[in-house]
Image (cartoon, rainbow, N blue to C red):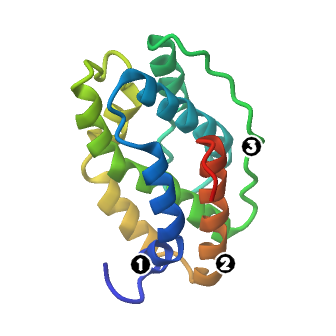
Amino acid sequence: MKAGSLRRTLYLGTRDLHEVLDKNIGTLADCSDYARYLLGTFQFRAALEPSLADTDFPTLELVDDLRQDLEDLGVSAKACLQPLVLDTHATKLAAMYVSEGSAVGARLIARRVAVLGLDKNFGARHLARQIADQRRWPAFLEWLEAQEDATGQAVIEARRIFMLAMQAYQVDA
């Protein structure tokens, strides 16, 4: 990460919340832990994705895959968080950063749940889609760094979006 880049600024500005969220998601050592993770991810993405539809970087919509993954595990999927309103450029940048950044962790999670017998055909469809295109993350970073400067506000908004994720996963800050 280059010093002064928007990515680095967002990373440093949200690292504390990201670490708390990662710690509370846990190791996903069994299907019960994974189902809890899936439900939190579904809640978060259901609140976030509708507002990402009009960004100029193509959104990877995962809600339908998450719903199917939950059904595979016998868990009912019902969105209960208020949809997030992304009404500024900085908010959209922040939301895309959090959304796209989750694909980085998806690689590790996919390896963990493969041990549980979950894959692109059963229980881990959303993960398979997140990690399928290895060019997506570098393309996103290129897009992010080309955006007009909204750094200060983008960090504030990214923290707000991480707080929504924590709410979805029922994690206290």
Residue 122 location, x and y as percent? 34, 15
Q: Residue at x 57, y 66 (%)?
A: 93
Q: Which mark is residue 153?
A: 2
When asked about the image quadrant of residue 89, the answer is bottom right
Q: Type of residue at label 3?
A: Pro
Question: Is residue 20 shown to the viewer in this render?
Answer: yes
When asked about the image quadrant of residue 49, the answer is top right
Q: Type of residue at label 1?
A: Arg
Residue contact between numbered discs 1 and 3, judged by CB atoms under 8 Å:
no
Which label's residue is closer to the chain start, 1 or 2?
1
Q: Residue at x 28, y 44 (%)?
A: 107
Q: Residue at x 63, y 35 (%)?
A: 43
Query: Which of the image's four quarters has the N terminus?
Result: bottom left
At label 2, counting other C-alpha atoms closer than 10 Å, the crowd grade (few under 14, some 14-19, many 20 or more) is some
Query: Which of the image's four quarters has the C terminus?
Result: bottom right
Secondary structure at badge 1 equals: helix
Is residue 47 rendered to the left or right of residue 162?
A: right
Which label's residue is closer to the chain start, 2 or 3?
3
Is residue 16 rendered to the left or right of residue 134?
A: right
Q: Which mark is residue 83?
A: 3
Tell me the residue that label 1 is attached to: 8
On screen, residue 92 above or below 151: above
Residue 57 location, x and y as percent? 49, 56
Cα–Cα span, label 1 and label 2: 14 Å
